[in-house]
Amino acid sequence: MANDKNNKKNKSKQKWNVNLNPTDPNNRKTTAYYLLVIVGIVMFLNYFIFPSYLTPATKEVTYSEFLTEVKKGDVSEVKLEASKITFVAADANGKKNVFVTGIVEDPTLVTRLEAANVTFSKDIPTEASPIMTLLLTWVFPLLIFWVLGSLLGKQLAKKMGGGAGGGALSFGKSNAKVYVKAGDGKKFSDVAGQDEAKEALSEVVDYLHQPQKYQAIGAKNPKGVLLVGPPGTGKTLLAQAVAGEANVPFFSISGSEFVEMFVGRGAAKVRDLFKEANEKAPCIVFIDEIDTIGKKRDNGGYGGGNDEREQTLNQLLAEMDGFEENKGVIILAATNRPESLDAALLRPGRFDRRVPVELPDLAGREAILKVHAKNYKMDPNIDYNTIARATSGASGAELANIINEGGLRAVREGRTAVNQSDLEESVETVIAGYQRKNAVISPKEKEIVSYHEIGHALVAAKQTNSAPVHKITIIPRTSGALGYTMQIEEGEKSLMNKEELFNKIVTFAGGRAAEEIIFGNITTGASNDIEQMTKIARAMITRYGMSDTFDMMQIETQTNKYLGGDTSSNVSAGMAERVDQEVLDIIKKAHEKAGILLSENIDKLHELSHHLLIEETITGEAFMRILNS
Ligand SMILES: Nc1ncnc2c1ncn2[C@@H]1O[C@H](COP(=O)(O)OP(=O)(O)OP(=O)(O)O)[C@@H](O)[C@H]1O
Ligand SMILES: [Zn+2]
């Protein structure tokens, strides 16, 4: 309810918030911290622990006692040091012990020792050998230090997504590199769907395989290819697969690393990167998040710009222009803000090719689910198509996450393979958060939520051209949703007509309308519905030309196709007012229609709501059975 998610078609990003950005500047802090701890441990061992192993337990005695022992002839060996005298003396049983005493100005000592026939030796024989000392105090700690260091370094490299592996803080090697070879042997077959992108990139692979074929005809090497698309759609994966298919080294760095990790050295790092790439050619250089260095340089005048970034960008442009045409260094770059890139980057001879990497369609989603399912033990009867239909708008990364969540759930439930219910539950988990099994909700609230959700479902079912109800639940979720109605489209929809859009708005209004009819009062539970329906109504007027007043005039433009969200208005203030009025009219009409549909079916509204209140979750089939009985 609050935040209820009864619409899978929605592509708003908050809903699919899976953070895959591997670059975490905190890593550096953590590493420095580990380093301090290691140094601390080594120092501790050196000063407190090892000495006690090296020096046998000694007993402190007075100088006169020492002289007495010498006189008695019990002392066999003596070591004179700057600040103390260590000596070995036998006790009553003839067992040798080590003693220590302070230095006293005593010119007669040597004579006395000679008289007692005591050996002067530099080392007390019972002390550890010098090799042992060296091993314990230096070699051993340094070894620990080195092993831990290189382990940490590797971990760091992994965390940074194969990016700045040997970055600023790498231990093992001192000549840190900004990039690592990390093709991981990925192939095109690891990338599901994305057929058009693969086709576009297969030319790059072919070029790397047989450059002569292209050179013979005089065709130039494709220098830079820009992969453009929303987050998590597999851009990095595609770049790795190109390297894998062509069997060439893969260098990768993320734009944000240039800016964050190598403050003041961005340009130098670009130079390094290309120097290395030139040596290893043919190869692939992958620059993720290129928009962070390649942003438009339009902060005109007054040095408001970011000099550091600009130098880095200039160096990148210079390198791209500089490297020999047919050397075989191909640069792939990824971004989800193509509109913000500096035009200089897009000029011929630089990133002059653009490969769209879009969100997967139905078939693509099914294929991605299957590719990832290969790494898990799955029940053979899983219907991937249903899962794919329920996840319209999900990216490849999110689908991968759904499979993994399903795996985790199967383990939690003590099963040995992932089944359909695990996947369905994990879809909901990814969309709405985990179930809050012991959330405290009053019986009255539960009743309201039941009517609200059935309100949505009933309105949806009573309209033609609206997606079938798949599941209704009033089990609260960690996202704050108190319940939701899940609708799943029968197939893939690329176009929506005006009636379908309007019906969707009516369905959103169904929850609130049910509350009004049954309780004569309204709650905050419709807040998410309100947000969604307003968005659709607004888009109908401002972007889809579905109003009589404005005909086919575009009123708003979306500033970023991939990240959604922002729109910019193209109309005068006076017009904007009329737009708002039109949006309001649609919403009012929809709200009214929802009320009428529910009033006409009030018996079913009661019956279904009571059923849901008892069952807490009902399937689409059960819902239809009761509705049609
Ligand atoms: N088409 C696909 N086939 C198989 N797996 C995919 C696909 N798309 C995404 N994935 C999964 O999602 C993960 C993240 O994808 P990747 O990092 O390549 O996305 P990206 O487009 O580079 O994202 P971003 O823009 O956030 O960097 C991949 O490691 C893979 O597990
Ligand atoms: Zn609702």
Image (cartoon, rainbow, N blue to C red):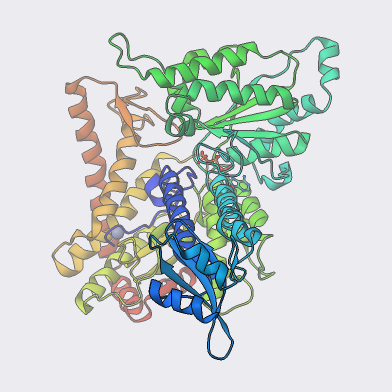
Ligand 1, by image quadrant, is top right
* Along the line of sight, the residue nearer the viewer: 534 or 87: 87
The image quadrant of residue 307 is: top left
425 lies left or right of 117: left
Q: Say which residue appears at 55% left-offset and 79% top-offset.
A: 73
Q: Position of residue 175 (x, y in %)?
A: 60, 33
Q: Say which residue appears at 84% left-offset and 24% top-offset.
A: 210
Q: Position of residue 67 (x, y in %)?
A: 45, 74
The image quadrant of residue 74 is: bottom right
45 lies left or right of 129: left
506 lies left or right of 392: left
* Along the line of sight, the residue nearer the viewer: 189 or 167: 167
Question: If the image is split into quadrants, where does the N terminus sit?
Answer: bottom left
Residue furthest left in the image: 521
Residue 469 seen in this snapshot: no
Residue 303 seen in this snapshot: yes
Q: Say which residue appears at 48% left-offset and 62% top-offset.
A: 45
The image quadrant of residue 418 is: bottom right
| Number of numbered discs on residues | 0
Residue furthest bottom in the image: 93
Q: Position of residue 477 (x, y in %)?
A: 35, 66
Q: Compared to 485, does 358 lie above or below? A: above
Question: If the image is split into quadrants, where does the C terminus sit?
Answer: bottom left
